[in-house]
């Protein structure tokens, strides 16, 4: 259930607010460099992996916050 809630939060964040300008700029900068160094297929693969990384970091951060709120983790 927690993973479903986190996924819905993520989808809401991306769909309603978009990514922050800073994140979008970093993503674009990395993909531009990758496109310069490799072919289109490799660049797309790396872009997908970057998107997966962004999602994984969001899920980890959200789980950490929820753990602190629920008392699972103590500062």
Image (cartoon, rainbow, N blue to C red):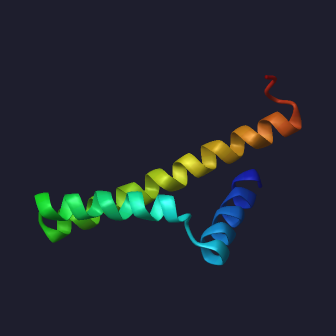
Can you say which quadrant of the picture contains the N terminus? Answer: bottom right
Name the image quarter holding residue 67.
top right
* Residue found 24% across the figure and 64% down from its top: 32
Can you say which quadrant of the picture contains the C terminus? Answer: top right
From the viewer's perspective, tell me whether residue 38 is left or right of residue 56: left
Name the image quarter holding residue 5.
bottom right
Q: Position of residue 23 (x, y in %)?
A: 48, 59
- Number of labelled discs? 0
Q: Is residue 67 above or below residue 45?
A: above
Q: Position of residue 73 (x, y in %)?
A: 79, 27
* Residue found 56% across the figure and 64% down from its top: 20
- Depth check, front residue: 58 or 18: 18
Name the image quarter holding residue 60.
top right
Q: Position of residue 59 (x, y in %)?
A: 62, 49
Q: Residue furthest top?
A: 75
Q: Is residue 58 above or below residue 71?
A: below
Q: Is residue 26 above or below residue 63?
A: below
From the viewer's perspective, tell me whether residue 71 is left or right of residue 67: right
* Residue found 36% across the figure and 56% down from its top: 49
């Amino acid at each position: 259930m927690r993973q479903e809630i986190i996924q819905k939060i993520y989808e809401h964040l991306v769909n309603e607010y978009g990514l922050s300008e800073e994140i979008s700029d970093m993503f674009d900068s990395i993909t531009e460099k990758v496109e310069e160094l490799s072919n289109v297929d490799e660049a797309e693969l790396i872009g997908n992996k970057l998107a997966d990384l962004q999602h994984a970091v969001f899920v980890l951060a959200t789980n950490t916050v929820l753990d602190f709120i629920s008392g699972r983790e103590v500062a």
